[in-house]
Image (cartoon, rainbow, N blue to C red):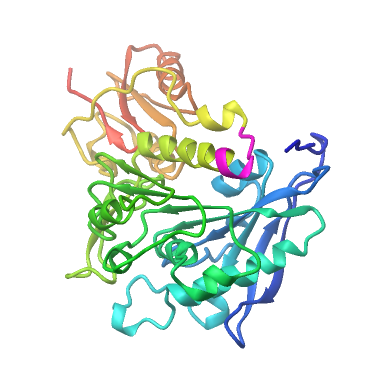
Amino acid sequence: MVRVHAAPLEVIRTLEVSFPSAEPGVVLTAHWTAPPVAADGALAIIALHGCDGLPTDRSRVGYPRNRYTKMLRDAGAGVLYVDSFGPRGEASICAQKLSDRKIFDDNRRMDVAGALHWLAKQPDVDARCLGVLGWSHGGSAVLAVADATNDAVRQAAIKPAALVAFYPGCGAYDLMLRYDVVAPLLVMTGELDNWTPAAPCERLTSRGQPVRYVPYPGSYHAFDGTSPVTERDNAGGTRFGKAMAGGNPEARAASAAEMLRFYEQYLGLHPAAESKLAEVHASAVPAPTQFAALAYVDRLPKVSENGKALYREWLTKPFPRAVAISGQGALARGYGAQAIETAVRNCEKLGDPCRVYAVDDQVVWTSP
């Protein structure tokens, strides 16, 4: 399919829209970033949030602030970010025990059915080229949307053409005697995930269906994020209510590229080369050390209070990122593919030799 992209100077807006879920009585809100104009209709992706729900600042799911919205829209797709919790009176369900939850995969499957119908009515969208994308609780919903053994899924007039699930809970589907998929499905998990474990997903995706399974070594839940790995104490559905979660720079970059390739194969998405490579460091990343925890600011060697403030701000920035420190405690930061080189270069402008202290979510410093 030939996609004709809009002019570079166009203003890209994310608009709040509403439409009915297939669940009776539920009217959904969603955030719609329209695709570039295409001669024969463009593709669109339905995005499903995790158990934390949508952020309070709704602009964080829009273009250009949301990483995935920007990545997919820049590659030619519209993105419809659906709020499944707000219309049902919930903000987050992460801390809820499974027995206390009132929103399940089937509810969200019906939300996707409503979203598919809404998208099919948009004049700039090709109803044959609709995808679904979800994270964690939203990833589990993707598995429900893909389940062709469900009558509503199998008989739907409008079906997704490709589905992607980041670290979903696969346990319930793994226990099914039969699990068929309505369209090609990509499942990605962290091998160390102790919230939504990888093993059930690996078993589920080995049944001969058009399913691709990609595990990421050394990765926990939410491996595509930028926050350091920490133990969450609101992990509902786990034995003790605790689980590790946080970003892995390599898995973050690799999973995004995997997703784009998958949608390219099955939807006709055309990701730009820079979208695939923008988050990869241009030089080798030093091995992590045990010098200090990433957020332990007081361990920064000889760094002033002003330098510590700069470091705290650096901790809030997305990957790729790096910090360099001189022997006298000067500190400089760098971002992007050249983050390591930039941090060292800016640090050495202050006159002393500098070494890298931290890269992304790892401290790599060793004492001289």
Quarter-of-image position of residue 15 = bottom right
Confirm whether residue 216 shows in the render.
Answer: yes
Quarter-of-image position of residue 141 = bottom left
Residue in view at x 17 percent, y 70 percent: 240
Image coordinates of residue 360 in percent, x first then y, are 37, 35
Taking 311 as reference, is 347 above or below it?
A: above
Taking 200 as reference, is 29 above or below it?
A: below
Q: Nearer the viewer, residue 227 or 303?
A: 227
Taking 359 as reference, is 107 above or below it?
A: below
Q: Is residue 155 left or right of residue 341?
A: right
Q: Nearer the viewer, residue 297 or 116?
A: 116
Q: Is residue 356 magenta?
A: no
Confirm whether residue 84 shows in the render.
Answer: no
Residue range (magenta): 265-271
Q: Is residue 259 left or right of residue 291?
A: right
Q: Is residue 267 magenta?
A: yes
Q: Nearer the viewer, residue 214 or 284?
A: 214
Residue lying furthest bottom: 25
Image coordinates of residue 314 in percent, x first then y, are 43, 38
Count of picture labels:
0
Residue in view at x 46 percent, y 41 percent: 317
Image coordinates of residue 267 in percent, x first then y, are 61, 45
Q: Nearer the viewer, residue 126 or 169?
A: 126
Q: Is residue 183 left or right of residue 330?
A: right
Residue in view at x 30 percent, y 78 percent: 98
Q: Quadrant of the C terminus?
A: top left
Residue in view at x 60 percent, y 83 percent: 26
Image coordinates of residue 75 in percent, x first then y, are 65, 38
Q: Quadrant of the N terminus?
A: top right
Quarter-of-image position of residue 239 = bottom left
